[in-house]
Amino acid sequence: MAAAMKLHSAMLFYILVYMDLFSFTISTLPNKYFSTKTPYAWTHPVPKPVEDELYYLKDIKGKACSAVHASAVIRHGARYPGLDDVQEISAVHDKLVLAMEPNINPELYNWVNRFPSNNNKALSSLGESEQEALGRRIATKLSTLFSDEDTSNFRFLVSSQERTKQSAAAFYEGFSSTIYGGEEAEDDFDSEVNDQLLRFFSLCAKYVFSVESNKTAFKEYFDFLSNERVVRIKEKIDKKLDIGPDVLTTANIRLIYLVCGYETAVYDSSPWCSLLDESDMEILEYLGDLKHYYKNGYGYNITWQQSCPLVSEIFATMDETIMDIENADDGEEPGGLLVGQFAFGHAETLGPLYSALGLFNDTLPLRADNYHQQSQRLFRTSNILPFSGNILFVLYECVPDEFGEDEEIEEADYYLRMFVNEEPALIPGCEELYCPYNVVRDYYHDFVDQCHFKKLCQRSEVKDEL
């Protein structure tokens, strides 16, 4: 009897260990390392919003401050993989089926590609949920600012890509249902396509020529792809699957990593994740960060400089809001204020915007040869550029806290706060999380007021930056 119980306990122990390892591989592993393919909640679990938690600014002594305008730039929600990736992963799987024994990894061997070939980068149901929830949270946090306004007081900007339009519609569904209690019809939603602001990267000839379509621009990425760290991941996978060294390439390894993330996001698990451990994921995340550092970040000046139309628009809208308030008749509320502007773009929109503003700027540039030195890097795309990543500016009007009934209010002060992925962030050039608007405006003066996009983006035959 005792022997039987010991055997039972031993079997149970091994089953639990197996289940724990399986759970770690399939579920826990993908939650933080998927670069720009990371679902928002994996790196930014958000608490339940508090009504009007952003409406009042309570830190200015002797001033009563309330929000008068909010402006957000939001990346589209989680999406399906592109058609090229869908087809390529099927091709990789075909190679593996021919090379491996079925019993080595039965789940992977019998895997079926569930990604639809007709949903080329379309918004997924997870992406819709991300955006709807974000709309609800922003509406709740600034409830008083938005609640008495009609649709003419809001502006929704999208790019020409369908996934940004779908994201804006989902955001509006959550936003409007929170403000109007479900009374506002979805048919009233209207968005404005503006690629000049949200797809500047496709309109800037200098960027397209010297960076996006220039393989040399991604030298650090390709150097790391052939680096011994990535090669070792490939060798480990070869050993796990008992396949020869010529079946997979290092490029296939990055695809396996991406599909692990895509499938886990859409279908909750993926057998491809069983091929990678946490160390592998960190290395492959850095590979993705290298790509986006040079494609969407600080790698080349033109990459962030080309975002000047978007930065200029954000500040011009806030300038106009202040002007309308200042020009309103004494004692009257200014009418027709644009209280909310929400722009829906891409990682290629948000990354250059971050860099233009001076956010997430590491002292040491990301390179193929300094992986270990970058363990605490600021430019970590899983954190800063996930699906539904966002930046929000809230403009506050501040008036004296107490004044006599017949006393005229002197010119108001205006303050600005910035939130990145719903967390308060210090605006460069400021000493506090709240900052006088004129200080911020002066800090970005040259970039905002000297935006000559056509001249900036004029193509040069010499790839002078590279």
Image: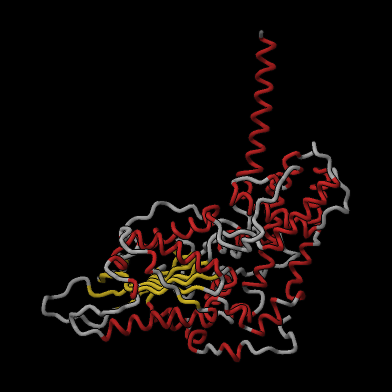
- The one nearer the camera, 81 or 144, is 81
Residue 435, image x and y in percent? 39, 73
Q: Quarter of the image holding residue 21?
A: top right
150 left or right of 345 in image: left
One can see residue 380 in this view: no
Residue at (42, 83) in percent of width and height: 316
Residue in front for this viewpoint, 181 or 20: 181
The residue at 50%/73% (across/down) is 158
**Spot occupied by residue 59 in the image (x, y as percentages of width and height):** 32, 66
Q: Is residue 293 visible?
A: yes
Residue at the (66%, 72%) spot, across then down? 295
Q: How is the image coloured?
A: secondary structure
Q: Nearer the viewer, residue 284 or 198?
A: 198
Classify 136 as above or below 62.
Answer: above
Residue at position x 51%, y 79% in the image: 194
- Residue 94 picture location, percent across and down: 80, 51
